[in-house]
Amino acid sequence: MADDLKDLYPVGEMPPLGHVPARMHAAVIRPERYGEPDQGFAMEVVDVPRAARGQVLVYVMAAGINYNNVWASLGYPLDVIAARRRKGAAEDFHIGGSEGSGIVWAVGEGVTSVSVGDEVILSGCVWDETAPDIRLGADPMTSSTQAAWGYEANYGSFAQFALVGDYQCHPKPAGLSWEEAACFLLTGATAYRQLTGWAPHTVEPGDPVLIWGGAGGLGSMAIQITRQRGGIPVAVVSSDDRGKFCLDLGAKGYINRNEFDHWGRLPDTSDDKAMAQWLKGVRAFGSKFWEVLGERRAPKIVLEHSGQSTIPTSMYLCDTAGMVVICGGTTGYNADVDLRFLWMRQKRLQGSHFANLRQCRQVIELAASNQLDPCLSWVGEFHETGHAHQLMYENKHPSGNMAVRVNARG
Ligand code: NAP
């Protein structure tokens, strides 16, 4: 090795372009630390992975914070390290981070779409481009080989270097800072697929859309995308401060969920008394929706991720022939559906997971052309990666999206 080359660089000290050191700093999760994020994450030094055929090594400038690495830290509902080891992975640790921004540092054999030195945004899913289902025309997000990068797949953006497939690299819009570029693609593209990817249930001008967690990562993106397409977003939040944030983003209005108490699983449908009580609660919530919307129309689309606690309300409130589209289950995974509302009113309950490359590019284009504010609300230092997830776990994080600086300096 030349005298001026090191095998480990301090965070923020950039190696000569293209020089790949042997080791790197990373915010690491290990099984023996599984638990709340404050304890689950720790800064460690690990070996830098090498880019194999079709892969790219990226020098990470900033990384976005997302809920999936709250789950990774808890080791629940999936022990991501054990799951990978069952499939033959050697590493006994997890480096999370499912989005980020950085500089292409090394490319594996066969990579032609990016070159060393390119500034990129990283999207959050991997798949095998030679998989039979993809070759037969499947959306890669529905491939049996698809996995969430920085969650199910290792070597995410919470490290000085990240390992991605070449197709995960998207040109970084020049007008965005490293931190802005790192924070919005996961939530933005997920919300975009939910709102535009499930024809004929796409947001069209004049469509009312109910958005749970309007001030959260997904919600802040969903409000803007709905507006951008001419829809009418109504947000649900847990405080007036968060409601004000949603109004500023373009929500027609907001509902404070703390004014209602019918949350949780649906009562047994044969329990008339409990059902009557639940119906009273959900109808009051529906009346509030009409009041906020300013007319007696139901939401054509309900953007769901809160799950068990809210899905009975979502399914009831959704318009006849409308769609509840769900990408998560923060409050639990039992989705109780009164099937009478589902079939009599011909509603659709649609699962949705992240986004394909076209949808990612469309969301990046919205941000590049100032039609989508990344809503970067909090920037932490690299060593605060665990703390940022702890804030999210406790629902005490600021509205919008969060990022940590990895190699970028403030
Ligand atoms: P976030 O920024 O924490 O926002 C979630 C919002 O949910 C919070 O702001 C909170 O708003 C609301 N919330 C919390 N508890 C609630 C409850 N009991 N009832 C109703 N609302 C509640 O998180 P996010 O990034 O938007 O992600 C949300 C969920 O979606 C997570 O479970 C995440 O794993 C999942 N997700 C999935 C994908 C995918 O591709 N499948 C992608 C992104 C996210 P208020 O307290 O103000 O109501």
Image (cartoon, rainbow, N blue to C red):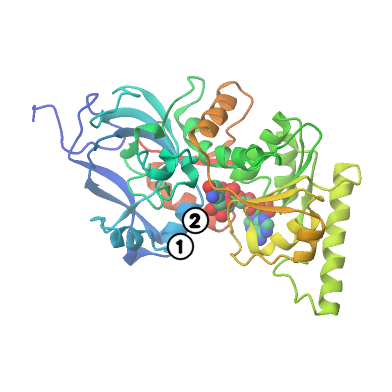
Residue toward you, 218 or 56? 56
Dividing the image into 4 quarters, which one contains the C terminus?
top left
Along the viewing direction, whichever of 128 and 405 lies nearer the viewer: 128
User: Disc 2 on helix, strand or loop?
Assistant: helix
Left or right, residue 409 beside residue 367: left
Looking at the rendered structure, which numbered label has been put on residue 146? none
Asked whether residue 341 appears in the rendered view, the answer is yes
Circle 1 residue: 36
Q: Position of residue 257 (x, y in %)?
A: 75, 57
Visible in this render: residue 261? no
Look at mark 2 in the image and give the residue it sits on. 390
Quarter of the picture holding the N terminus? top left
Q: Amino acid at mark 1?
A: Glu
Q: Residue 360, position in %: x, y?
A: 52, 33
Q: State how many labels appear.
A: 2
Q: Is residue 272 above or below residue 187?
A: below
Residue 378: % across, % down: 53, 40
116 sits to left or right of 399: left
Element on which disc 1 rests: loop
Q: Residue at x 42, y 59 (%)?
A: 73
Residue 400 position, x and y percent, is 60, 41
The tag earlier along the polypeptide, 2 or 1, is 1
Which residue occupies the foreground of this view, 266 or 247? 266
Residues at marks 2 and 1 touching, judged by CB atoms closer than 8 Å: yes
Could you classify mark 2 by the number of other residues whose Cα lies within 10 Å: few (under 14), some (14-19), or many (20 or more)? many
Q: Amino acid at mark 2?
A: Gln
Which residue does the image show at 64% across and 25% down from the upper left? 371
Q: Quadrant of residue 339?
A: bottom right
